[in-house]
Amino acid sequence: MAELDLSPKLLVGEAWQDFGLIDSGHGRKLERYGPYRFIRPDAQALWTPRLDDWQADGEFVPGSDEDGGGRWVFGQNVTGATGAGREVPRDGWPLGWNDVTFTAQCTPFRHLGFFPDMAPVWDWMGAMLRPRAGGDLGQSSAASDDGGPRQRGDATTLNLFGYTGVGTLALSDHGPVTHVDASKKSVAQARANAALSGMDTRPVRWIVDDAGKFVAREVRRGRRYDGIILDPPKFGRGPEGEVWRLEEHLPALIADCAKLIDTDSRFLFLTVYAVRMSSLAIAGLLAEALADLPGTIEHGDLAIREEGEAGRLLPTAIFARWRNG
């Protein structure tokens, strides 16, 4: 029976060459994405900014609707701008994380085409998928993605709500990955990122589908995975107009995901953004669904550390994870 660890954990994302949290406060944050600096709203930044000068190349100005809306402004339209600023390519620019290269872009959804706070999650999943001390991942009777037996040391992972594929490409270092997203545009960008990274020949299944429908079919097929990650939105729509509401549909999706892992599997990782929910609540959901499996269920916060001596932590999301080994 999986043990629920009640002590909250903290996964902290640090700056890397192409990304950093420069400063935060008064409900906003200043970040660097490659050569460009952007200001975005963040309700968690309750404190006072450290820096007086927040010169940026672009800013997302939120709308009046608490749940979304807003627009990007650039150049002299940025708050506090004293000059024209650098011209930000509207069709995006390349960034890198480890051996993955991908396109960053100012999207209508206030983010830039990927989620930098997921970097420690990608690292953690990679560590969980490395061969055990015995030399392999263990062997399951489950089918692989092509219907054959799952091979020793060849990890199979499922990335639900995979978006533009940075996490998928990181997972592909360890074996076949199934990438699922309801947005045809996002999956197309994920495939483009694979090509940009020189990883377009890796064994990745790129699937445009509703996550719940896809997982239900995988259950009927008797599939098993070594790891599953899911990063569901608060609200969304599938390719055929299916409606996703987190609080309403997450329990059934987790219950089906639990049928795709077994005693040889390594992890299930769930992240949740922008909801009035605690990490303990989603950990309890995993504990119920995975009651028949060994391992440990942990929960806590994702955060990004500011650059500079202060190193303040800006929380970004909650998570719950099951780990086996």
Image (tube, grey):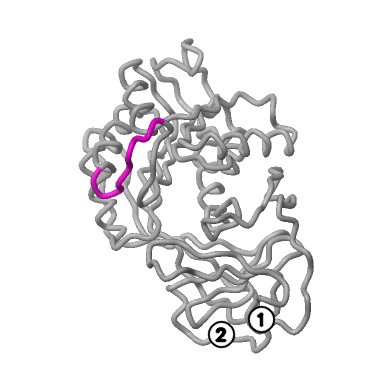
Expressed as whole percent of the image width and height from the top left, the position of residue 134 reads: 50, 29
- Percent coordinates x, y for residue 291 in the rendering: 22, 38
Q: Is residue 21 magenta?
A: no
Q: Quadrant of the N terminus?
A: top left
Q: Position of residue 252 (x, y in %)?
A: 24, 37
- Residue on which the image places disc 1: 54
Residue farthest to the top, as pictured: 148
Q: Which of 84 and 1 lies nearest the eye of the viewer?
A: 84
Query: Can residue 193 be seen from the camera position used here?
Result: yes
Of 87 and 145, the residue lying toward us: 87
- Residue at image position (77%, 73%) is 85
Q: Is residue 74 left or right of residue 183?
A: right
Q: Quadrant of residue 260?
A: top left
The residue to which callout 2 is attached is 49
Q: Label 2's element?
A: loop
Spatial separation of the CA atoms under disc 2 and disc 1: 9 Å
Question: What residue appears at the point 48 percent right and 78 percent down from the top-left corner?
Answer: 27
Residue 173 can be seen, yes or no? no
* Viewer-nearest residue: 73 or 269: 73
